[in-house]
Amino acid sequence: MVEADGGGGGDCAGISLHSQHTDCTQHTCFPDGHSLQTPGHQQLIALCVTHTHTHTHTSGTLHLLTMASLEEELTCSVCRDIFSKAHPLPCGHSFCSPCIREAWSDQREGKSRFTCPQCQEEHGEVLCDSCPPEVEEGQPPLAVKTCLRCEVSLCAEHLKPHLERPAFSTHLLVDPLGDLSQRRCPTHTEILRYYCADERVYVCGDCLLEGDHAQHKVKALRQVEEDLKVILQTLLRKAEEKLKDGERILKEHENIDSTMADSLKQDDTQVERLGSDLQFQVKKLVSALREITKRERQQVIEHVHEDCSKVREDMSQMLSIQHYLASLLAETDPFLLIWIHKDVTYSFR
């Protein structure tokens, strides 16, 4: 049977599968009082909703596929068994405690950080300080948060009071820390909860009372966080404005590029049309020049032919005169020769 329990505010949402006295609840809770479902949980809830919505319309194969997918989400990816007791990692994936310990034992070799067997994201192994030792597993469950006020690391189960009870609302919860020594004042061994803006160092409560920071500008880390986030929000808005300006400029440039492309296309069309017109005009001009040349050549030929005809006619007449003169030279009568010579001389004038 599948049960989906949801809660608001400080409640943590969970999904449980009861099969053969097996109880499994996976959820990761955060300081804001909300439950952040792991990727598997989000798919699991979607499967539950799909199964409920379609139960009255489908049966048989679809039901088996849905339950098979549901079982897959509640199965440890290492041992392939349904979780006997799941322990979530900060990356959102969950495994059986023995499986994650065995997987990390192979990676140990002096390492302080380990990788998730499924997504290979690095994590530090931080155990819950509130869980009693487990005989069959050897070590307590993994912590999901560390409370800097209580100075303890807590698993999902022991973290619930910090999320649900008002008395813990001011406690600062961070990702699991295996070593708090870097968070302690080296002089007073107290947790560093304040920040000195004058010297830009972390200080503890005793430093404010006894140390040299009494007259300095000191703020609680939460207040510094809020101030920094205000600054970061301002910078974020400026960055977003810069991005919008960049997008606007890029869009303008894209519009210019598009306009130039259209203009180039139009210019190409005009140039092509002008080239066609010029080719037509050139062809027309060449044709006209050929016609003029042909006509002028024809006129010259005709004129030459006319001159030739006239010359031939003159030559024919001259040939006749030549023959006549030759006949006169053969004349033996002086009287007749003189008489004919006067007529011939008059004709040549």
Image: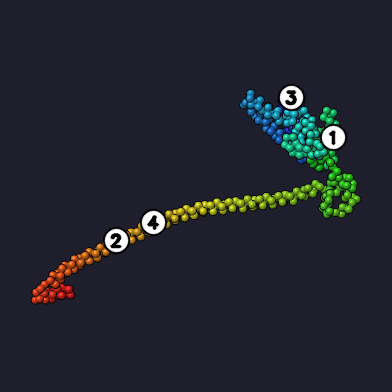
Front residue of 142/23: it is: 142
Structural distance between the alpha carbons of marks 4 and 1: 101 Å
Q: Where is residue 293 in the image (x, y as percent from the top left)?
A: 33, 61
- Residue type at the position of mark 2: Gln
Quarter of the image holding residue 36?
top right
Q: Earlier in the sequence, mark 3 or mark 2?
A: 3
Q: Is mark 2 on a helix, strand or loop?
A: helix
Structural distance between the alpha carbons of marks 4 and 3: 95 Å
Q: Is mark 1 on a helix, strand or loop?
A: loop
Q: Dot 3 corresponds to which residue?
A: 19
Q: Which of marks 4 and 1 is nearer the N terminus?
A: 1
Structural distance between the alpha carbons of marks 3 and 2: 117 Å
Q: Where is residue 246 in the image (x, y as percent from the top left)?
A: 64, 52
- Residue type at the position of mark 3: Ser
Q: Is mark 4 on a helix, strand or loop?
A: helix
Q: In this view, does 56 lie to the left or right of 302?
A: right
Is there any visible trace of residue 162 in the rendered image? Answer: no
Front residue of 281/305: it is: 305
- Residue type at the position of mark 4: Lys
Q: Dot 4 corresponds to which residue?
A: 283
| Residue 318 numbered tag | none
Q: Dot 2 corresponds to which residue?
A: 298
